[in-house]
Image (cartoon, rainbow, N blue to C red):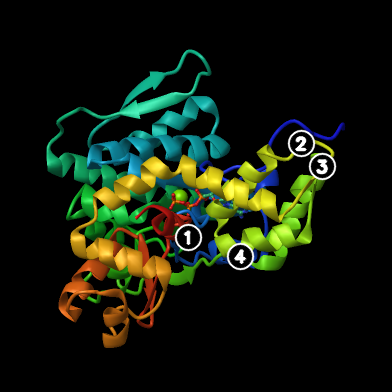
């Protein structure tokens, strides 16, 4: 195959699939084994760390090993009815389709209290499911309960491993206050089904799984996803340049990873800009990285302006301080150095920024998690 010299090999925003996916080998093996064992897992990480991409890769491996994998993204299901519709679709497509002949498939919905309306897409013959716009809550609740039972039942009868992936699971509490309890009561009756919960809002994940008053308390193995290591990410960057007839100096790779710290999205974004500025046949260097960074900041300007405009006065002082010096903002000397308000006000500002996932904190040390925001603040705020 001729080398692809014209298409940028770096991607950010969409799932990292196939060639765009790197490293995470240990996690792929661990999660695949857990799923095949029927072990429930909660996978959490800050935003844009590659949770969904990793789970997609794991799904591919699971499907290759005869597992049935149903997948629902709770971000796209704001109501119980929408959730039931999505679930009906994935149970039909991903569980019933591999198991039954076309004529038999719809019979899986026979026992539902509310019957779905089935629509055929004339373009590709795919089916979608909808429920009455205003069903009685108890009816849609019973329907959802039955749909949640189906994957385990259908796969169990045929001795196939079955996995239910719930992405953006922190939304479960927003959809309906009673939903966590309903889900948990169904899930604990199906030990053979591996439930994989993915979530981006660390706080909510911790509350759902770590608060003993919550139904999901300690119900799953917790796996935290970190950044991608310097060595595999560096190697990946070099390879992507090389396979598109370009080169990159080692110092430039180091400069990229020094800026991004191996943050998956940020690294791909910066590399995208750098590649774009590197003509075929030439070699990217450190100056190129500075120019690419300027390009990234320019392109993120509107987004960062919104973060800044949405911040209170105390939050702004704190943001600027953390951009200059990640550290312990509640300590008296830190507050003095950066002109921060009293510890209680700083604490409130810190908590709000943490909830918004703009700031991260570990053992009291705080830093700006949003990639490139620290640099933008130093340049603009
Ligand atoms: N394994 C990987 N190798 C290379 N790049 C990756 C990898 N995983 C993620 N990325 C980069 O990070 C971006 C975000 O990935 P993904 O959407 O999977 O993250 P996420 O944690 O699910 O994000 P969100 O919090 O928005 O749901 C991708 O578009 C890609 O640029
Ligand atoms: Mg995701």
Q: Which mark is residue 258?
A: 4
- The residue wearing badge 3 is 282
**Could you tell me which residue is drawn at 44 percent across and 71 percent down?**
222
Question: Which marked residue is nearer to the observer: mark 1 or mark 2?
Answer: 2
How far is mark 1 from mark 2, CA to CA? 47 Å
From the viewer's perspective, is 310 left or right of 124? left
Q: Which residue does the numbered mark 2 point to in the structure image?
A: 279
Q: Earlier in the sequence, mark 1 or mark 4?
A: 1
Q: CA distance from mark 4 to mark 3?
A: 23 Å
- In the structure shown, which secondary structural element does the residue marked by tag 3 occupy? loop
Q: Is residue 341 above or below residue 138?
A: below
Q: CA distance from mark 2 to mark 3?
A: 6 Å
Closer to the N terminus: mark 2 or mark 4?
4
Along the line of sight, the residue nearer the viewer: 290 or 274? 290
Point out the tag, 1 or 3, that comes first from the N-terminus: 1
Mark 2 vs mark 4, CA separation in Å = 24 Å
Q: Which residue is mark 1?
A: 194
Quadrant in which residue 140 is drawn:
top left
Query: Is residue 175 shown above or below 349?
Result: above
- Alpha carbon distance from label 1 to label 3: 48 Å
Image disc number at residue 241: none
Residue 208 in view of the camera: no
Q: Quadrant of the C terminus?
A: bottom left
Residue in the image at 71% along x and 57% along y? 252
Q: Residues within 10 Å of mark 1 (few under 14, many from 20)?
A: many
Q: Which secondary structure lies at badge 1?
A: strand
Q: Is the Cβ of the residue at disc 2 closer than 8 Å to that at disc 3?
A: yes
């Amino acid at each position: 195959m001729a080398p692809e010299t014209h298409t940028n090999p770096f991607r950010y925003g969409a799932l990292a699939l196939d060639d765009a996916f790197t490293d995470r080998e240990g996690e792929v093996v661990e999660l695949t084994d857990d799923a095949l064992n029927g072990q429930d897992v909660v996978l959490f990480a800050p935003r844009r760390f590659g949770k969904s991409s990793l789970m997609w890769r794991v799904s591919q491996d699971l499907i290759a090993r005869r597992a049935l994998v149903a997948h629902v993204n709770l971000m796209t299901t704001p109501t119980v009815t929408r959730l039931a519709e999505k679930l009906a679709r994935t149970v039909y497509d991903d569980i019933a389709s591999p198991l039954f002949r076309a004529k038999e498939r719809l019979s899986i919905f026979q026992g539902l209290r509310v019957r779905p309306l089935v629509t055929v897409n004339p373009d590709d013959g795919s089916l979608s499911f909808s429920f009455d716009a205003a069903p009685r809550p108890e009816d849609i609740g019973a329907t959802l309960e039955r749909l949640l039972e189906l994957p385990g039942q259908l796969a169990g009868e045929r001795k196939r491993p079955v996995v239910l992936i719930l992405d953006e699971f922190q939304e479960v509490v927003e959809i309906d206050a009673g939903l966590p309890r309903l889900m948990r009561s169904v899930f604990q009756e199906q030990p053979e089904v591996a439930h994989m919960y993915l979530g981006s809002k660390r706080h909510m994940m911790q509350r759902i799984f770590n608060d003993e008053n919550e139904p999901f308390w300690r119900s799953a193995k917790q796996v935290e996803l970190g950044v991608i290591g310097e060595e595999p990410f560096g190697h990946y960057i070099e390879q992507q340049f090389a396979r598109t007839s370009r080169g990159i100096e080692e110092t430039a790779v180091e400069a990229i990873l020094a800026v991004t710290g191996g943050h998956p999205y940020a690294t791909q974004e910066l590399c995208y800009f750098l590649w774009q500025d590197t003509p075929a046949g030439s070699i990217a260097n450190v100056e190129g990285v500075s120019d690419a960074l300027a390009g990234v900041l320019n392109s993120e300007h509107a987004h960062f302006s919104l973060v800044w405009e949405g911040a209170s006065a105390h939050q702004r002082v704190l943001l600027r301080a953390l951009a200059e010096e990640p550290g312990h903002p509640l300590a008296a000397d830190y507050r003095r150095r950066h002109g921060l308000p009293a510890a209680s006000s700083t604490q409130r500002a810190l908590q709000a920024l943490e909830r918004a996932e703009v700031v991260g904190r570990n053992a009291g040390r705080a830093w700006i998690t949003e990639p490139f925001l620290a640099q933008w603040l130093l340049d603009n705020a």
